[in-house]
Amino acid sequence: MKRLLLLGLVCFTFASVIAQQPDDIQKLISDMLESVADKQLTNVSYEELVNDLVALNQMPINLNTATKEELEELFFLTDYQIENILYYRYVNGPLYSIYELQAVDQLDSLTISYMLPFVKVAPAEAKVKQYFLGSILARVQSTVQTPAGYLPKNDSVPAAYLGSKEKWMTRGRLQFGKRAEVGFTLEKDQGEQAFPNHFPAADFTSGFVKINQPLKFIDTWMVGDYRLSFGQGLAMWTDMAFSKSPETAQLRRRAKGIAPYSSVNESSFLRGTAIQMSWQNFSFAPFVSYKKRDASVLSDSLAEERLSALQETGYHRTQNELANRYAVNELVYGGSVAFQHHLIQVDAGYVSWEVDHPIEQKEHLKDKYRFSGKQQESAWLSHTLFLNRLLVFGEVTAQNQMHYGIYQGLTYNAGSDVVMSLAYRKYSRGYTAILSNPFSESSTRGGESGLFASISCKPVSRVELKAFVDVFSYDWLRYNVYKPSDGVEWFAQVDFRINEFHSVYLRYKSTQKEINDTQSQQHYTITNYQKDNIRAFYAFSPDDKWRFQTQLEHAVYEKQEQTSRGWTAFQDIRYKAGKQLSASLRYIVFDIDDYNSRIYSYEPDVLYAFTIPAYLHKGTRLIGNISFSPLPGLRIWGRLAHTTYANQQEIGTGNQLIKGNKLTEWKLQLQYRF
């Protein structure tokens, strides 16, 4: 009886707050990624994250039967929030209503609003309904202006780009309840040809078949294209992962094991088969992959064909880029063995990566420890230990029995909404781990070591403080840094939720690194530089239809006597009329001195697409988005972005050069669900 009275009070107190939160999936994902999106600048596709969340929206997690692994799919939940949800259910029994989440310790209204599209409350003994879900999506995008690469140089010299300037993508997915899933992806980048001699006629073709529990001890069997994530990402991780962030939920990687691949990155996936088997608390996941991938072939090879580098752009627009297409065969195989208990998780495994042509050793001294040869082997051991308020995790990886990677961390929940974390990493000079995605400052991790610390707290109601500091060093030369070097980055943000209508945050980030001294004649003289960014953000939502956002950001880059500055400001207006229509308009003003003071900022886009451009020069940008549903199951998105530069007569360089100071980009997307 007391519990029912408590539930009634919770519903009465918080129902209006939760009702004010918009339920649009695209907006939720955008809000969750906003604070960390500007750190993911290269070779990162957010599509897989969005795919997972949208699929989860179609098949919500039942909180009365959810396991820890299922709740970990909600990447914005911390480990303590997950433990508290499970503990609340253990103590009080099944939940009566979704509003009962407000009674769970450390779950605030904002976190619950993020959860609502992806969870449900149903009787634990309820029979699982068998269903059939499907979706087909098509997207096309281009620019109004035509870059130089699409224009013939003269009557005898054709255009550099072989294909049209439109980029298109088609994706389909079928789900047969929880038993099986089938999907495919077709894509052509701007400037590429669609290959008429192949079916389907696309530059990139991908597909998978996933079968759940085909036999008693087999949880998942994957055939086709897939992604893997094990441990903390030091040896085997082809999935997306965040690095530095004040969010403690991102510090410990939550490995998904085997998952289908439906993105358009043409290198970061495996093609073959993988199986997830389990018995009591143990699991075993063997995998094998064989595919062709792009690489730069050395033209002066006299004996065995050799490679200068693997290519990851996926572009096949020119004759030279086309010559690199599928230039090498890649074989990957290995397996993972894991033990999982409520208090401890241990994962160990081995992976072998091999290509049929060796990668040439580069001559520059900075590349002395870069990978060369044909084969790379890695073995890893990772652990996670849950000790009440303390969480300890880490991984150790050995590569080719010579090089290593170490990542160890802990998170401590001190109570009273105070959470602290600490992580140490050290990667030997020769650590390259081609299939890895570890916590790091640089994309070339060899020789890096660092100590990362973060804290989040709520000193008073409606105010949250987040901060981190990362001190790192490199014991060998790197690109544009021809001596061992050091650096530090720190970040602080204060969020103030004035009420359910108004919210504000202030953010300050400072990065200090060492770089080659361009004013010195000595190649091995380095100097310091510092870049500071400060951002102010304000959001106003008068009701569930309108939302207004304002953001100002200023950047300062200093190196010896050189100083450059940049600033951006934008105003957002968003409108949503139920589930049938939504629209947004953003007006941006920017003034950036040079490349060093560039500013990255997330831009609203169509579902599954994320745009994070670098603002340069001086000008304005207008972005309009619209989404509407004319028929049940059918949704259409449109995006138009127009940029005008005040101090430029040309935009871009080389084949991407556009005459004039205006750039207009458009995008159209359709999706049908059945």
Image (tube, rainbow, N blue to C red):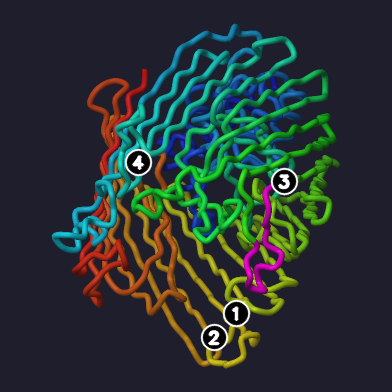
First-in-chain label (1 vs 2):
1
Secondary structure, mark 2, is strand
First-in-chain label (4 vs 2):
4
| Disc assigned to residue 235 | 3
**Residue behind mark 2:** 559
Q: Do residues under tags 1 and 2 come within 8 Å of each other at their CB atoms?
A: yes
First-in-chain label (4 vs 1):
4
Q: Is residue 590 magenta?
A: no
Q: Judge from the rendering whether residue 490 lies leftward or rightward of residue 166; answer left or right.
A: right
Q: Residue furthest front?
A: 302
Q: Is residue 625 above or below residue 630?
A: below
Quarter of the rendering containing residue 567: bottom left
Q: Do residues under tags 4 and 3 come within 8 Å of each other at their CB atoms?
A: no
Q: Nearer the viewer, residue 440 or 71?
A: 440
Three-letter code, disc 1: Ile
Q: Do residues under tags 3 and 2 come within 8 Å of each other at their CB atoms?
A: no
Q: Judge from the rendering whether residue 646 lies leftward or rightward of residue 605; answer left or right.
A: left
Q: Residues within 10 Å of mark 2 (few under 14, many from 20)?
A: some
Indicate which label's residue lies in the foreground, 4 or 2: 4
First-in-chain label (1 vs 3):
3
Q: Residues within 10 Å of mark 3 (few under 14, many from 20)?
A: many
Whether residue 43 is visible to the viewer of this picture, yes or no, is no
First-in-chain label (4 vs 3):
4
Three-letter code, disc 2: Lys
Q: Position of residue 644 (x, y in %)?
A: 23, 66
**Residue behind mark 1:** 515
**Residue behind mark 4:** 188
Q: Main secondary structure of the magenta part?
A: loop
Three-letter code, disc 4: Lys
The magenta region covers 361-375
